[in-house]
Structures are given as structure tokens and as C-alpha cells.
Amino acid sequence: MRRDVRSLGVVYTPAEVVRPMVELALAPVVHGKSADQLAALRICDPALGEGAFLVEVVRVLAAALAATGVAPAMARARASACVTGIDIDSRAVAEARRALGPEAQLVVADALALAPPERPYDVVLGNPPYIRQEHMTGVKSALRGYASYDGVADLYVYFIELAHRIGRRYCLITPNKWLTAAYGRPLRAWLAERGSVEGVVDLGALPLFANADAFPSIVWGTAGATPLAGPVRAARVERGTSVAEALRDAPLPLPRAHWRADPWHIDAPADRALLDRLAARWPALADVLPARPARGIVTGCNRAFVIDRVTRDRLLADEPAAAPLVRRFIKGRDLRRWLPEPDERWILLVDRGTSLAQLPAVRAHLARFRDALEPGTGRKPGTYRWYELQDPVGVHAASRAPRLFYQDIQTEPACCLDDSGELVPDTTVWILPTGDRYLLAVLNSRLYRWYARRRFPPALNGAVRPKLEYMRALPIATPAPRVRAEITKLVGQRLAGRSVDDAIDDAVFDAYALTARERAHVLDS
Ligand SMILES: C[S@@+](CC[C@H](N)C(=O)[O-])C[C@H]1O[C@@H](n2cnc3c(N)ncnc32)[C@H](O)[C@@H]1O
């Protein structure tokens, strides 16, 4: 593994997070203990950093010891002797040593590769590294020994399992992705089997880490020989709530049976009832589409392949035979609700296997960028030729049939129809291989917007990412023919410029057979 700070997943934790987490983790193990019992506690942070958590642990334990009558200086030394910190970064450990004093056990090591301690720690807590699997080299084989192993899981997933291997009570802050992502499935299944989770809060809406687009969550529990039986406390925290309030008030006790391998969505009760009903009643998008959705294209060098009107006109005047390769190019940011608004941009659609022998003007244009186009030096290594697009274009991007497009990051629903079949989208666009106007209405509706905010992972600035695995599960109502015909007609009017959005929203509610109460709930949310 590279040892620069970024590759170690280093984001230190602010006090407003550390304090309530330490309180939550320590309160039950400290409560009612004598000085000797307190001094016998063993607390571990396996991704110590500069010691943010253990400094707070020492403060809390020292206060508890002092409350039993131990002199303050002695209380601090005894509290420091209770903590163990592990970090792969020797610089951070040296920094932590300064803060924690000589009594603390601090180790420079890969926590995931250490043998478990002889006696489990009473508490394991911390903020494990966020390192995407593509940046982990060398450690992957060691991770295969974990029950929660998944080839594309972030490193923090293994620290959640590690907490069970080395300790009893745990409280960890990690990205919230494991709660719903496909790569979190083995971990969720394993946690369900262990039955250790007491609570989980999704803090995705809170800007806790200034420089990281991490959407955090906190999970805590007690790993014992027998699984816990009671409900799991869960909350999805809104902006304006503090972490302390979120952990204290986590209000939603959900039956333990709810937390299995499937995504751990944390929904308000009124949302949950409707979400469950929609999923049970209607087929998923994946089951109604004629083929899998696809991404738009990756050129590897836009300045060579993407051309403006002047270049296009000149090229086609020189070489009319190039016309089939010159297509209108659209980026995600050009998508609007209903219809796209493409800029004056065209793409030279030189897919794998295209011969430019008869198209010398196209070849000459691309040759001007040859250094930047060479596979392996200018662009990603691969078996493509220098004048070909970097990734294969794919049938849906190249298709001239009507298709629907939506953005891979959405602030608002913005699905649009390319009826001309002329557009070729870039990689920030998802392509649905259908021109179905009913589906277009659904994907622009208030109901979809409501659903997307509850089921798609958050992105920056309040946007959501309708990744394929989540989009495929979107329930698509099968409306009565009369309702479908009405929606299709309304969409035709909308495409012609009439403002019938409210009527379309109502008709989509009809299609999904929502009750008046459910409609009001969606509109009020
Ligand atoms: C997100 S930081 C958190 C640090 C600290 N616990 C805090 O909250 O301020 C993650 C830490 O994990 C460390 N780290 C990365 N990989 C590790 C590994 N395999 N074993 C132990 N520590 C690791 C990094 O060096 C970094 O200090």
C-alpha cells in the first residue's frame, strides 16, 4: 500500500462527533464500576490517527476514576493505561503518543492483519480509513479471510468486522454506503447473523468532514456469544441535528428481522409503509425494460473527438462520407426534464473496428492529437487503436432508436426523450433503451422525486446518484390502459411545450393507485 496520507484514508474526526460516540460506547461499561474495575477496562481504536477518540476516552475514564476518589494525576495515568491504539502510519502514532502519554499502548501496524488479543477489548471504537478498493494494493489477499469480503468493498467494511473479532462493545463512524451498496451485502448478512447491532444512524445529510465528500453513518452494538433479541434503533438524520442528538434520540426501534442481507434503508414509518407497498405491488424497472440500461460513451480525449460547428461543417464539406460518424453529442448537464438542450457539439463516433482508410479528413483531424490519443501513454492502456474511442461505444449509445436519458447525479429529476435517435450521450448520462412516454412521465414525476430521495445514495449539495443497482429496483406501475393512454397524451402535450406537469403528476399517482393520504404524504414531503 502506498503510504502517502491520502492513500491511508486519513480524515481526522471532529470533537462534535468524537464526544457523543465515546459517551455512547463507554456509558454502559463505565456505569457503576469501582476504581479497580475501571482501571481493568481495555479500550481500542484500531485506526488511531492522532488519537482523537482515545484522548476523549482517557478524559472520560479519568473523570470516572476521579469520581471514585482516585487523585486526578493518578486517575489520568490509570486511564491512559486502559487504551490501545493501532495505526499503520508511524507519524500519526508518534503524534498520538504525545497526546496520550507513556502509559497508553500504541502500535504501528496494519490492524486488519494483527492476531486478535488474548482477552477481547471491552470497547472498540473509532473512524476507520475510507479507502476505495482500487487504491488498495497488496492487502486484498489478507482481506479474503473476512466474512464480509467483497472484491469492491471499501477498507472500512473490514474494520466493522474486525471490531467483533477483537472486542465486545463497538461504536464506529464510517461512510454510509455499506448500509445499501451491493458491496455491503456480505457484511450486512454477517452482522445479521451475529445479531450484535444495537443502533445505526445515517448522518449522510450532515457536513461533518470539511474536506471529504464522505456521507457518514455510525453503527454501534455489543458482540456477545448470543445474538441480541431486541429491536435496532435507527435514524436518518436531517440537517440541523447534532450528532449528540442523533445518537441520543435515534428514535426508530425497528424489529431485528428487518436487518438482514438486503439494503438497510432507514425510513420514517410513513415512508416505509408506502415504499414497501410500491415494491410489493409493482414490478421493478429491471423487469419491464427490454434491455439493461447503459452508460454513455468515454472518449479518453474529448478535445480530439468532440468538435464544434465550424469544425464539423468544414469536415463534412471536405468529406461528406464521414456523415454517419458525426453525431450530436450531449453531456449530462444538457439534460432537462422532458427534452434535452444539447449545446453545439458533435462527436466523431469512431468505434472499435472502424476503418478510416476512406476518411482521410477525419483521420487527419484526429492525427493532430495523436500523442494524447495513444493507448497507454496518452490514454488508458488497451487494445484499441489510437484513432478509436477509448471504450467500446455500446449498442444503446450508438443506437438511432428513440431512447430516454437521465443524469448519473440528479439534483432534480431530469429525464428526457431523444426521439430523433440522433444524440450520443457522454458517460455522465444513463440510457434507457426505450422511448416509452409513460416511463418518461414516471421518471419526471413528484412520486419519483420522493422515491429517489429515499432510495438513492446522496451526492454533494443535496443531489442523489441513481446508480444502476438502485435504479433497477424502482417500482414501475402497470397502469390500466386508459391511464397509460392519458399519460402518453399528456406527455405529448408537455413535449409540445404545454405546462401540464401537475396533471402528469396526478396521472402518475393514479397509475400507482395511491390513496389520497399517500398522495398528500408524497406532496408534503
Ligand atoms: C479516517 S482516519 C481516522 C483517524 C482517527 N481515528 C480519527 O478519528 O481522527 C483513518 C486512520 O486509519 C489509518 N489506517 C489506514 N489503514 C490502516 C490499517 N490497515 N490499519 C490501521 N490503521 C490504518 C490511517 O493512517 C488513518 O490514521
Image: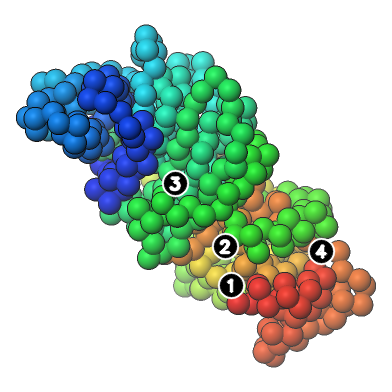
The residue that mark 3 highlights is 217
Q: Secondary structure at mark 4?
A: loop
Say few, some or many: other residues with alpha carbon within 10 Å of mark 4 (under 14 / 14 to 19 / 20 or more).
many
Q: Amino acid at mark 1?
A: Ser
**Disc 3 versus disc 2: nearer the observer:** 3
Q: Going from the N terminus, do you reach mark 4 or mark 3 first? A: 3
Give the residue displayed 69% in from the left and 85% down from the top.
502
Q: Position of residue 523 (x, y in %)?
A: 64, 77
The residue that mark 2 highlights is 453
Q: Are marks 1 and 4 in contact (CB under 8 Å)?
A: no
Tell me how far mark 1 sits from mark 4, CA to CA. Answer: 21 Å
Dividing the picture into quadrants, the one containing residue 112 is: top left
- Mark identifier at residue 477: 4
Tell me how far mark 3 sits from mark 2, CA to CA. Answer: 17 Å
Q: Secondary structure at mark 2?
A: helix
The residue that mark 1 highlights is 525
Q: Amino acid at mark 4?
A: Ala
Tell me how far mark 4 sits from mark 2, CA to CA. Answer: 19 Å
The reply, left or right, for residue 117 in relation to residue 50 is right
129 above or below 476? above
Query: Which quadrant, please, contains the C terminus?
Result: bottom right
Q: Amino acid at mark 2?
A: Arg
